Image (cartoon, coloured by chain):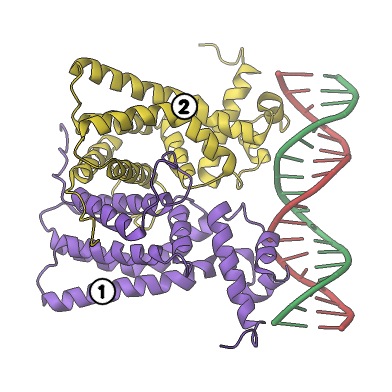
Chain colours: A purple, B yellow, C red, D green
DNA sequence: GTCTATAACAAGATAGAC
DNA sequence: GTCTATCTTGTTATAGAC
């Protein structure tokens, strides 16, 4: 194993990305200065602009680095399920497991940074920063469209708007699930420490319960 | 109706709070400058420090103004339910409805600013800003303790950690539900515009489905 | 209570030496 | 590719006139 033959240049990018991921997660985009990032990464202040062009572009790269792969894996799993089903609609639970299971697997990777990234992602959803809003929408477009289409086919009797909302609710629950494992939160300190696999099965059971819940009364006309 | 007899001083505080609430929701704490707030409020820049002491204290006051009442109402509803039950455990669905129903009612108040506030609140949960973390924990402590105790009594056969997590998941779903009504989001543009009452019943049905879901397999020992 | 002016500092970005 | 030094702008906060 080469120790630091290539400690420069190629490594600098990664060091910056790792530091940025962790700091953006902790302090948010506006709360994280470039000086803080380069300080933690052990690189020069000017390196961010040299390697990424700007703070915003660095932020985007932090997401692209992991998100592209995550959504590719999601789609691959969905492809496999659909191939296996041979034209028949999938079970809703399989679809949900494919989408959220991949995310939870990434979140379980504490060493490799997947955990930090998924927390950052959850946090960013509710941070309506203009430039990242559009970026995330593009990055997710294909994956979300594929999964929604699969759910529409799997639940033809359910109004599409209802499916959309439930999918959205599930994203919220997952986001909090990941954030809650060691973050702030009103309930912090009340949780026993427990392994991510246990959490994943807790969440999945909750999500499927919500997805299968009886439809709401549309209310009085 | 008096037009602007008291346009000063007492009104200035409210104007600042309203502007701050809306801007903090849109741009976050760090992304919102005092110049922006005072500009939108139509008051002088120095007014924030005069009336609130600092930007941080203003932020806290934005929350206190609405949160204290919200949690008081929640507790009042719980008190009424428990009085009615006369010592018997409550139905879990009633407890959940009390807690989230009050929040949803506030979120439905678009005119009065409750909607903006609830979106800000949901966003702030995932923003682990040190000073607001502690503040929110204190502001919520009594209410959360009361509702958790009620749930523990209502579901004695369910492991407490499981209840804690499901409560947490529900908070996440609610947060996204409120944010998603007109915010960013990957699914934005896909939602038909619809009234908040409809959304509330959609969410409640999802939450109860999740709460009632079969317990997860603890997994292999 | 409200205002102007400004102090004191931190931010992102870049020019130019090495 | 990396560094230092610096430019420009924007930030919170406050002193002091009105």
What residue is disc 2 on? B66
- Is B31 rendered above or below residue B67? below
Percent x, y of residue B81: 24, 20
Direction front: furthest residue? B221
Which residue is painted at 21% across and 31% down in the image? Answer: B154
Quadrant holding the C terminus of chain A: top left
Instruction: Report, in whole angstroms, how far the alpha carbon at label 2 lies from the one at label 1.
Output: 45 Å
Percent x, y of residue A181: 41, 52
Instruction: Identify the secondary structure beneath mark 1.
Output: helix
What residue is disc 1 on? A77
- Is D11 rendered above or below residue A117? above
| In the image: residue B38, left or right of residue C9 | left
Crowd band around label 2 with a 10 angstrom C-alpha radius: few (<14), some (14–19), many (20+)? some
- Is B219 rendered above or below residue A57? above
Front tag of 2 and 1: 1
| In the image: residue B59, left or right of residue A183 | right
Crowd band around label 1 with a 10 angstrom C-alpha radius: few (<14), some (14–19), many (20+)? some
Percent x, y of residue A160: 20, 54
Chain under numbered label 1: A
Q: Mark 2–mark 1 contact, CB under 8 Å? A: no
Instruction: Identify the secondary structure beneath mark 2.
Output: helix
Q: In the rendered image, is residue A112 in sight?
A: yes
Which residue is painted at 65% across and 18% down in the image? Answer: B9
| In the image: residue A119, left or right of residue A102 | right
């Amino acid at each position: 194993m080469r120790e630091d033959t290539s400690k420069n240049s190629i490594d600098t990018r990664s060091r910056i990305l790792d530091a940025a991921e962790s700091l953006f997660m902790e302090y948010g985009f506006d709360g994280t200065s470039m000086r803080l990032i380069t300080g933690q990464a052990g690189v020069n202040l000017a390196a961010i602009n040299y390697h990424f062009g700007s703070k915003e572009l660095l932020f985007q790269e932090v997401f692209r680095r992991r998100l592209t792969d995550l959504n590719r894996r999601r789609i691959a799993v969905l492809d496999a399920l659909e191939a296996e089903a041979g034209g028949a609609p999938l079970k809703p639970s399989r679809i949900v497991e494919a989408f959220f299971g991949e995310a939870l697997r990434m979140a379980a990777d504490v060493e490799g940074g997947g955990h930090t990234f998924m927390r950052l992602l959850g946090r960013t959803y509710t941070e309506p920063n203009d430039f990242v809003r559009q970026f995330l929408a593009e990055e997710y477009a294909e994956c979300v469209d594929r999964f929604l289409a699969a759910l529409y086919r799997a639940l033809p009797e359910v109004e599409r708007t209802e499916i959309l909302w439930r999918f959205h609710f599930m994203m919220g629950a997952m986001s909090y699930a990941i954030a809650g494992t060691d973050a702030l939160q009103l309930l912090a300190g009340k949780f026993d420490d427990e392994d991510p696999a246990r959490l994943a099965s807790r969440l999945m059971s909750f999500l499927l319960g919500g997805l299968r819940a009886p439809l709401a009364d549309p209310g009085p006309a």
